[in-house]
Image (cartoon, rainbow, N blue to C red):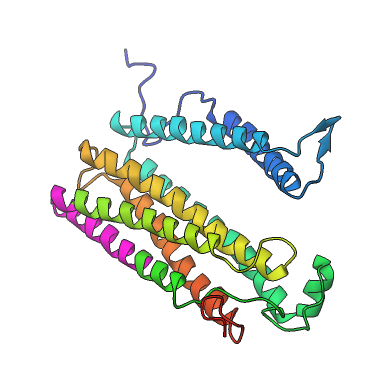
Amino acid sequence: MADAHHKNHDYHIIDPSPWPLVAAIGTFLLCFGGVGYMRYLSGGSFNILGLNLAQPWLLLIGFAVIIYVMFGWWSDTIKEGREGHHTPVVSLHLRYGMIMFIASEVMFFVAWFWAFFDASLFTGEAIQAARVEATGGTWPPEGIAVVDPWHFPLYNTIILLLSGTTLTWAHHALIHGDRRGLLQGLTLTVLLGLLFTGVQAYEYYEAPFAFKNSIYGATFFMATGFHGFHVIVGTIFLIVCLIRAARGSFTAERHFGLEAAAWYWHFVDVVWLFLFFTIYIWGGWGAPLAETGH
């Protein structure tokens, strides 16, 4: 008698999983926690059902839940791959899923570029909508000293371009069976990602303008800040890949985890190039530089 549970197809029917529900709860907490935290920073209130959520704790809880979901869900996915469930059809669909995710991220950044261009090209309407003081109809607004694009931003551009090179080196080393090159390339990429984050944090610390009370500051920090967040996520992604590579989890034939991390990292590289040329160079053209004062 044939086994009633025998699988005669290439698809993988996963076991019941709690992760979609837990992820939805974490996202809900993250969303409302973010609004409450911004109200907390501005000294306002955020009342829901008699509770004042204008505090940072809900945001931190949301982050913790999302990180827990990422660890648990992706650990299950790795386990499924080790058990042989990632057939060619399943692997193809994993690639389609990663492509769709990156496409959604592209549209996410399109929104921030749109906001920056709308504020910079139509200064009068943007100022009136944002309810901030008049800036003379110029961009950058009068009184704003911008970050010198040829200082920290240029450093970070070089850092990210180098990181893309080292990551490509690591990928090619894996394909050609060079385990030492794989580990060296991934290690350098992680270090460059951490260096980028450190340089951007210092740039923010030294920034001559604030997030609030300025449409320039708001659009600048939202666009570059979310990119910085993606760099942190990509660095964590690569650290996980480095740990897995050190354990011998990747082979020349099966290494989609590393491929997905590489796709994501190169996407982050390309977004930064657009940010560098549009926000730092074009967006600050003609304004006084904070470092030189002219």
Quarter location, residue 23: top right
Rendering quarter of residue 289:
bottom right
Q: Is residue 59 visible?
A: yes
Which residue sits at x=44%, y=56%?
197
Q: Is residue 248 above or below residue 278?
A: above
Looking at the picture, tell me which residue is in the foreground, 26 or 156.
Answer: 156
Horizontal and vertical percent position of residue 280 = 54, 75
Quadrant showing the N terminus: top left
**Which stretch did the figure color magenta?**
160-181
Examine the rendered structure and indicate whether residue 89 appears above or below residue 150: above
173 and 159: which one is in front?
A: 159
Number of numbered discs overlaid on the protein picture: 0
In this image, 216 relative to 165: left or right? right
| In magenta segment, residue 121 | no
Residue 98 in view here: no
| Left-right relation of 181 to 123 | left
Where is residue 285? Give x, y as percent: 58, 84
Residue 235 relative to residue 60: left or right? left
Q: Quadrant of residue 134?
A: bottom right
User: In the image, residue 283 lies at what x, y percent?
Assistant: 60, 78
Q: Main secondary structure of the magenta part?
A: helix
Q: Residue at x 71, y 37 (%)?
A: 55
Name the spot of residue 144 as percent of width and height, x first: 66, 76
Residue that lies at the very extreme toward the top in this rendered image: 1
Question: Would you say residue 165 sits in the magenta stretch?
Answer: yes
User: At x 67% / y 79%, what residue is drawn?
Assistant: 140
